[in-house]
Image (cartoon, rainbow, N blue to C red):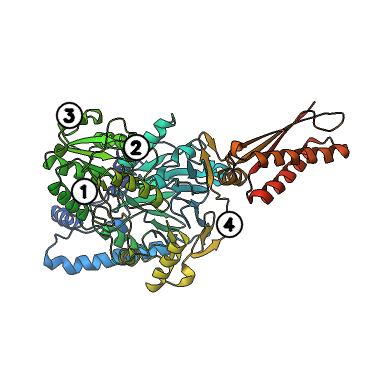
Amino acid sequence: MENITENSKKRGSGSAGSSGRKPADGNSRRRSLNKGYNRGRQKPSATKEKKTAKQNQKHTNQKGKAAVISGSPVPADKKRFSKSAGKQNQSKIKSNKQKRKDNAQEKRIRTRGTGDPLRIIPLGGMKEIGKNITLIEFRNQILIIDCGMSFPEDEMFGIDVVIPDFSYLKENANKIKGLLITHGHEDHIGAVPYLLKEINVPIYGSALACGLIENKLTEHNMRADLRTIHAGDIFNVGIFRVEAVRTNHSIADSMAFSIKCDGGHIVHTGDFKVDYTPLDGKRIDISRLAALGDEGVDVMLCDSTNVLRSGYTPSEKIVIDSMNRIFDKTDKRIIIATFSSNIYRLKYFMEASILHGRQIAVSGRSMEKCVKLATELGYLDLPETAFVDIRKINNIPDSRLTIVTTGSQGEPMSALTRMANDNHKAVKLKKGDVVVFSSSPIPGNEKTITNVVNKLYEKQVKVFQSDSVDIHVSGHACKEELKLMHSLIRPKYFIPAHGEYRHLVEHAELAESMGMNKGSIFILSNGDSVVIKNKQAKKEAGYTSAEDVLVDGYGIGDVGNVVLRDRKQLSEAGLIVISAAIDSNSGLLAAPPELITRGFIYVKENGPLIEEATNVVYEAIDQMGRGETKDLQAVKGALRDAMRSFIYKKTKRNPVILPVILYV
């Protein structure tokens, strides 16, 4: 993993995919040019030099300005004045600001909207939660934003994860210049290993996001070109000028991206909320977002997850206040289940434990990995003595122990679920233990979470959930925060993203309520495209394939609708195998047929039904034999149809019928 800031100094240009030539030193080049230009000219007077120095001093950059990591200077329209100038200079500063703003606007009008089409293609994340991936394509170059996975739906039996369709990327592999990561959640990075198996591409993300990706790649025995970026960095990826802007979310170092090219200016918010009291003290960079809006934004893609919720998303600070109250009132073991990637929440839970004289045990593979990674990267800075091995917790008094664990979503193999089922090797739940679910249910997980909670209650464990106490807040913006984002960015065109269809529709209506023209809002499906040409945008439905790709073990994409249908049928009605040997001369049965059932009925208790079903086999084979039919597929089809009809008539069930025929 390389730090792109350092790397860009070596490269000079910082452009991903550049030729690697070292550019000439800018100062030496200017000196050589000025030799001839200044030959014979008088040197400026000392008075003039002082005056120039004073003027230059006024034009200092604002403190904390974005780092330029490509090695090239920030364009004039992005520079800001210092606010430390005296009152006598305020009118002049305002005048210069307005001139710079006007010049930037003229430059934008002059350089953008060229005849080359700028295309935006979502391959995932539209009309669904998860599997987020968006392509920006211009002049035969492609920039990817995020590459996530989603969890299988209830009827996807046996499927581990769902990933995007990479067909378009494989067909255009030579055009791909880089992958930008907004943050390190699974629905934004989970499919990265599967993409890298097809295409080698440099990845740009925060230190935490790159670390999480590196952990995933290690599991797949893979390596990648990981380039660390920070909020405020400006860099080139091919022909795209990218700026990372700090946002707030439920994971550290989340970013929005401003992407500029000759075809236009795109802002992708990533997942965000507006938190004025974030746990890490790093607030969303509203001033920079406003400045981007002033520069002019052609298209904004914006998080739609919480558009149905009015008001504002609460701050993470209220979670810490609630947890402190739980610590104050509890003299038993406290077991906290939360997302392992929520590093700052983990940090404050652990610090609160230490303040209350408790040691911390970590349980669950992903939790252990994230805690280790966060410690290595400096997000967690806790003394080693604060931790205790999970296998040695029996030596710690209950009032002096906190266990941080996975399982907030009721995952079957998670540490908390194993505790609830008495299957955990180190933790045996006791009466009076306190379990805190510092999370909200992901849609579809409600039933599994309820099952775990009921088992915890059976063990007389005290359970806290987010619906009864403020121990979790969302990481996504509610309506008023979305309105703020629209007010700051003020895009010409808008694409609601990251949400189910109802979320996208509601977000489109919100944009209309903010004064946006309905014709400038595009609700997309995965695989659709929005193309901008000559300053005008239009939607192209079904531009490319974007079907779900199902991952089952080591198999990627080899399970389709037919297989899922069979699995569903097997789960609902079971299987009947008809085993029969047929005389190749007479076409009749050479031995009594055998019926084997799985998941259909208990054979010992249903002898009469099995006997009748066996007679159906005799009759079907006899009819085929009299017709002297020896076509194997025809015989199988006749057996399948006859048995299916009989079974449905007798039981109203539709098990899978599998004939196994042998000619002797």
Q: CA distance from mark 1 to mark 2?
A: 33 Å
Quarter in which the N terminus is drawn: top left
The residue pinned by badge 4 equals 542
How far apart, in angstroms, are the residues tagged by discs 3 and 1? 34 Å
Q: Who comes first in sequence, dot 1 or dot 2?
A: 1
Q: Earlier in the sequence, mark 4 or mark 3?
A: 3
Q: Earlier in the sequence, mark 2 or mark 3?
A: 3
Question: Which residue type does callout 2 highlight?
Answer: Arg
Circle nearer the viewer, 1 or 2: 2
Q: Is residue 381 left or right of residue 187?
A: left
Q: Nearer the viewer, residue 168 or 559?
A: 559
SS class, disc 1: loop
The nearer-to-camera label among 2 and 4 is 2
Kindly report the distance in space between the C-alpha atoms of the residues bearing marks 4 and 1: 42 Å
Residue ID for mark 3: 395
In the picture, the disc for residue 280 is 1
- Asked whether the residues under the numbered discs 2 and 4 touch, taking CB atoms below 8 Å apart as contact, a structural biologist would say no
CA separation in Å, label 2 and label 3: 21 Å
Q: Please tell me whether mark 4 or mark 3 is closer to you in this view.
A: 3
At horizontal 82% and vertical 28% (from top left) the residue drawn is 583
- Mark 3 against mark 1, which lies toward the viewer? 3
